[in-house]
Image (tube, grey):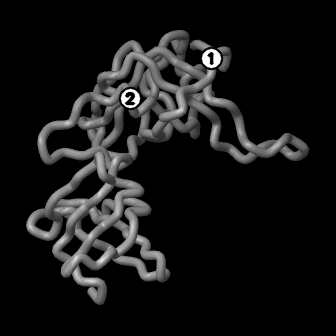
């Protein structure tokens, strides 16, 4: 495995958590923050990992630094993603990474198709509702198991909206302008 000798990119996006080992040859089992078959890790050649465990008593705050790893192979398996990384050749080595966060630079993600969006790109977009009402900014995208995700929109007035991210409720999405038009009233 490659170490922390290289500064991580500024556009890292956490894509999942390492859940443990898979098999005896060093494969990692990753719980992705989305569908395993759609994970950007499937096409990446490198990723970054770091421990998310609380710091030891007396350790400085801020957690561990990101460490670069080279991805050799990735494949979906049920609801997890299986990864083989350079330098991790045994179950014991893989188990040592259990609980680590795994990320990749946003700039390395594959191009999205028409009317497809990476959730990370929607966060921060201003949502404009019916009659031009400014509903707020997207603070998170939630997946409650419905056929579509839900935008969590926080308004400047403290109001919060949960807006289904599906047609016909969502109209134009302009990522360049960071704007989403929604057929949604401020009092919904």
Looking at the rendered image, the quarter that the C terminus falls into is bottom left
Are the residues at dot 1 and dot 2 in contact (C-beta closer than 8 Å)?
no
Query: What residue sits 52% from the left and 18% below the top?
Result: 69
Which of the pair 40/80 is nearer the observer?
Answer: 40
Q: Residues within 10 Å of mark 1 (few under 14, many from 20)?
A: few
Which of the pair 179/160 is nearer the observer?
Answer: 179
N-terminal of the two: label 1 or label 2? 1
Query: What residue sits 23% from the left and 68% below the top?
Result: 164
Q: Residues within 10 Å of mark 2 (few under 14, many from 20)?
A: few
Query: What residue sits 41% from the left and 41% below the top?
Result: 31
Q: CA distance from mark 1 to mark 2?
A: 17 Å
Q: In the displayed orientation, state which residue is furthest to the bottom.
A: 187
Query: Please, what secondary structure does the residue beneath circle 2 have?
Result: helix
Is 165 left or right of 40, judged from the image as shown? left
Which of the pair 127/15 is nearer the observer?
Answer: 127
Is 149 left or right of 147, judged from the image as shown? right
Image coordinates for residue 65, horizontal then vertical, percent: 68, 31
Give the labeled residue for mark 1. 6
Is 98 left or right of 112, judged from the image as shown? right
Residue 155 in the image: above or below residue 49:
below
Residue 116 appears in which quarter of the rendering?
A: top left
Q: Mark 1 or mark 2: which is in front?
A: 2
Give the labeled residue for mark 2. 107
Which of the pair 109/176 is nearer the observer?
Answer: 176
Query: Please, what secondary structure does the residue beneath circle 1 have?
Result: loop
Q: In the displayed orientation, state which residue is furthest to the right.
A: 58
Image coordinates for residue 29, horizontal then vertical, percent: 43, 32
Is 131 left or right of 154, judged from the image as shown? left
Q: Which mark is residue 100?
A: none
């Amino acid at each position: 495995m490659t170490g922390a000798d290289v500064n991580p990119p500024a556009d890292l996006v956490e894509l999942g958590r390492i859940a443990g080992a898979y098999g005896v040859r060093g494969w990692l089992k990753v719980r992705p923050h989305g569908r395993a078959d759609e994970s950007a890790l499937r096409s990446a050649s490198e990723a970054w990992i770091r421990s998310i465990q609380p710091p030891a008593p007396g350790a400085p705050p801020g957690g561990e630094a990101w460490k670069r790893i080279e991805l050799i192979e990735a494949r979906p398996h049920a609801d997890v993603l299986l990864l083989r990384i350079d330098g991790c050749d045994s179950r014991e080595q893989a188990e040592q990474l259990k609980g680590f966060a795994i990320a990749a630079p946003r700039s390395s993600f594959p191009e999205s198709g028409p009317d497809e969006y990476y959730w990370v790109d929607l966060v921060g977009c201003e949502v404009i509702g019916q009659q031009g009402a400014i509903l707020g900014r997207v603070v998170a995208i939630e997946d409650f198991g419905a056929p579509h995700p839900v935008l969590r929109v926080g308004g400047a007035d403290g109001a919060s909206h949960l807006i289904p991210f599906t047609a016909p409720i969502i109209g134009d999405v302009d990522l360049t302008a960071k704007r989403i038009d929604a057929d949604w009233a401020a009092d919904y």
